[in-house]
Amino acid sequence: QVQLVESGGGLVQAGDSLRLSCAASGRTASTSVMGWFRQAPGKEREFVASITWSGDITGYAVPVKGRFTISRDNAKNTVYLQMNSLKPEDTAVYYCAADRAGSFEFWGQGTRVTVSS
């Protein structure tokens, strides 16, 4: 099993920045990709960004490309999501997830981000 704990959410104004953290524990060696997803009120959960533990390969959803940066610290088993130039449409609960065998199997409890205009 892999446990994921997100932190760093909060209430900010449009244009501000936030950094989310995801601390992973347990059998993290069994995972290959870490991802961030978000779910806005009344909408389905959507992909935000991903990163491999070893290959440093990243991917981003179009709405956040150029504004968000995903990174990881292997020594701390932690993945980060730096969010800059936040917009009201970025308001959502942000979830961290860990992939195993091609699907995101493990999920955190989420951290809420609210961006006011």
Image: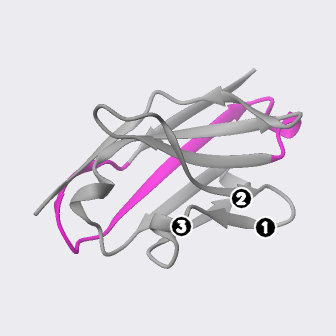
Whether residue 63 sits left or right of residue 102 in the image: it is left
Observer-side mark, 1 or 3, equals 3
Whether residue 77 sits left or right of residue 45 in the image: it is right
| Dot 1 and dot 3 residues touching (CB under 8 Å) | no
Using the image, tell me which numbered label, if any, was put on residue 51: 2
User: What is the CA distance from the residue labelled 2 to the residue labelled 3?
Assistant: 15 Å
Image point (31%, 75%), residue name:
85
Tell me the residue that label 1 is attached to.
57
The kind of residue tagged 2 is: Ile
Q: Estimate the x, y position of residue 70 in percent, counting from the top left.
A: 58, 64
User: What is the CA distance from the residue labelled 1 to the residue labelled 3?
Assistant: 16 Å
Observer-side mark, 2 or 3, equals 3
Q: Estimate the x, y position of residue 87 in percent, counting from the top left.
A: 26, 65
Image point (76%, 38%), residue name:
99
Q: Nearer the viewer, residue 82 or 66?
A: 66
Quarter of the N terminus within the rendering: top right
Tell me the residue that label 3 is attached to.
62
Of mark 2 and mark 3, the one earlier in the sequence is 2
The kind of residue tagged 1 is: Ile
The kind of residue tagged 3 is: Val
Q: Residue furthest top?
A: 1
Image point (53%, 67%), residue name:
62
- Dot 2 crowding, Cα within 10 Å, few <14, some 14–19, many 20+: many
Whether residue 33 sits left or right of residue 72 in the image: it is right
Secondary element at image label 1: loop
Question: Is residue 44 highlighted in magenta?
Answer: no
Q: Where does the magenta region start and end?
A: 8-32
